[in-house]
Image: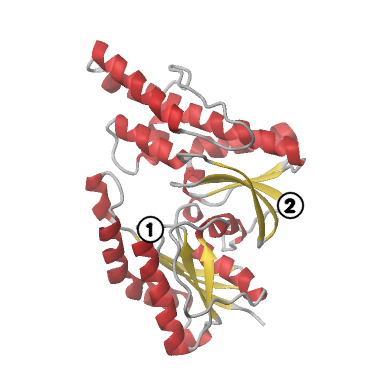
């Protein structure tokens, strides 16, 4: 008998609801919050207020698009964390309230685990789940991790950032260049027009499989400061080349450790997930790495890389199979490791 899950995602600034039947996606509705763009970053209080306004119509729309009612739902999966506490509280409270009123069980989902399980979403255009075991390079706004995945709910972190994440490095570099928020897509766009070998930036020397991007950000800052002293028009005249060089350096940092993880584990099925996985340069690098190691690369569609409820619903499906339900007293967690 098919299992139908309602997924709710509210970890940051997008309110989303989705319906999956087993692994088949029936609907995935996202309400974006453009209010943050003028501030150059997400304002937590504004985000939580927007979630309060959006969550009811978003869930209602997801049910209608899927052709389902609450009577068809077997469980409500929601993002428990990590994320902005105020935003998480809205989604958690809504899921709990809906559960109390309908007696539908709830399932808490780790947002990062959801990103990885987005690779298992099936729709009319995509059906390419990874073979186990596989290594996943999880790159999002606030997290950068290398994760060994041996089953849908069996994940082991092999390496993680010790300071800033890749997404933060993209956004901070973009801010230094005067680009609008979010900066990662802007750098990716400009990089297509620039010379990636035009400029050199520092790369970290971190042991094990951990990442660091703070030194890289500092090197970009000092480089731009010094060049602007010599020529106030330097950024304007070299914007595409700087963007291309920034992107190349970040990708090289990511791929270097990921390739080491492949050699250490012997696993040749590789994947990427998370918002930064939408970056065209990273997707190309992962595909080239798979060819190099004679392995297979799994890259999710762009629409499933950013925060969305489809990934929460699919994670909820696998947890439903394990009867892993959450108590009604559960609370959100701003920090929550896989």
234 lies left or right of 334:
left
The residue furthest right is 266
- Residue 125 image position (x, y, % from top left): 57, 58
Evaluate whether residue 219 shows in this view.
yes
Residue sitting at 27 percent across and 44 percent down?
A: 40
- Residue 150 image position (x, y, % from top left): 72, 55
- Residue 321 image position (x, y, % from top left): 66, 74
- Residue 242 image position (x, y, % from top left): 38, 23
Q: Decide: is 209 above or below 94.
A: above
Q: Quadrant of the C terminus?
A: bottom right
Q: Decide: is 320 above or below 143.
A: below
Callout 1: SS: loop
Residue sitting at 49 percent across and 88 percent down?
A: 103
The quarter of the picture where residue 95 lies is: bottom left
The residue furthest top is 230
127 lies left or right of 301:
right
241 lies left or right of 138:
left
Q: Quadrant of the N terminus?
A: bottom right
Towards the viewer: 276 or 296: 276
Q: Which residue is mark 2?
A: 133
Instruction: Verify CB contact (< 8 Å) between mark 1 and mark 2.
Output: no
Q: Which residue is mark 1?
A: 84
Q: CA distance from mark 1 to mark 2?
A: 31 Å
Towards the viewer: 36 or 210: 210
Q: Which mark is residue 40?
A: none
Towards the viewer: 137 or 306: 137
Residue sitting at 42 percent across and 72 percent down?
A: 92
Residue sitting at 22 percent across and 46 percent down?
A: 38
């Amino acid at each position: 008998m098919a299992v139908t899950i309602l997924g709710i995602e509210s970890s940051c600034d997008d309110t989303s609801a989705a319906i999956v039947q087993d692994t088949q996606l029936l609907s995935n509705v996202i309400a974006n919050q453009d209010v943050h763009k003028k501030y150059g970053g997400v304002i937590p209080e504004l985000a939580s207020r927007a979630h309060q306004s959006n969550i009811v119509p978003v869930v209602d729309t997801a049910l209608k698009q899927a052709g389902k009612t609450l009577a068809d739902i077997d469980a409500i999966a929601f993002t428990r964390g990590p994320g902005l506490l105020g935003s998480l509280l809205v989604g958690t409270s809504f899921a709990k309230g809906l559960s109390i009123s309908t007696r539908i069980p709830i399932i808490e989902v780790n947002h990062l685990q959801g990103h990885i399980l987005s690779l298992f979403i099936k729709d009319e255009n995509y059906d390419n789940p990874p073979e186990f075991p596989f290594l996943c390079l999880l790159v999002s706004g606030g997290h950068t991790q290398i994760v060994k995945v041996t089953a849908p709910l069996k994940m082991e972190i092999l390496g993680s950032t010790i300071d800033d994440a890749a997404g933060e490095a993209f956004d901070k570099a973009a801010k230094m260049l005067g680009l609008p928020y979010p900066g990662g897509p802007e750098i990716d766009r400009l990089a297509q027009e620039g010379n990636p070998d035009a400029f050199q930036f520092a790369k970290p020397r971190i042991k094990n499989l951990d990442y660091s991007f703070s030194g890289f950000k500092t090197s970009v800052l000092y480089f731009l400061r010094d060049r602007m002293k010599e020529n106030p028009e330097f950024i304007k005249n070299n914007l595409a080349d700087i963007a291309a060089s920034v992107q190349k350096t970040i990708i090289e940092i990511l791929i270097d450790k990921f390739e080491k993880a492949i050699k250490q584990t012997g696993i040749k099925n590789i994947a990427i997930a998370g918002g930064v996985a939408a970056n065209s340069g990273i997707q190309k690098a992962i595909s080239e790495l798979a060819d190099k190691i004679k392995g297979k690369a799994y890259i999710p569609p762009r629409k499933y890389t950013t925060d969305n409820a489809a990934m929460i619903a699919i994670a909820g499906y696998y947890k439903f199979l394990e009867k892993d339900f959450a108590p009604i007293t559960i609370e959100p967690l701003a920090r929550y490791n896989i």
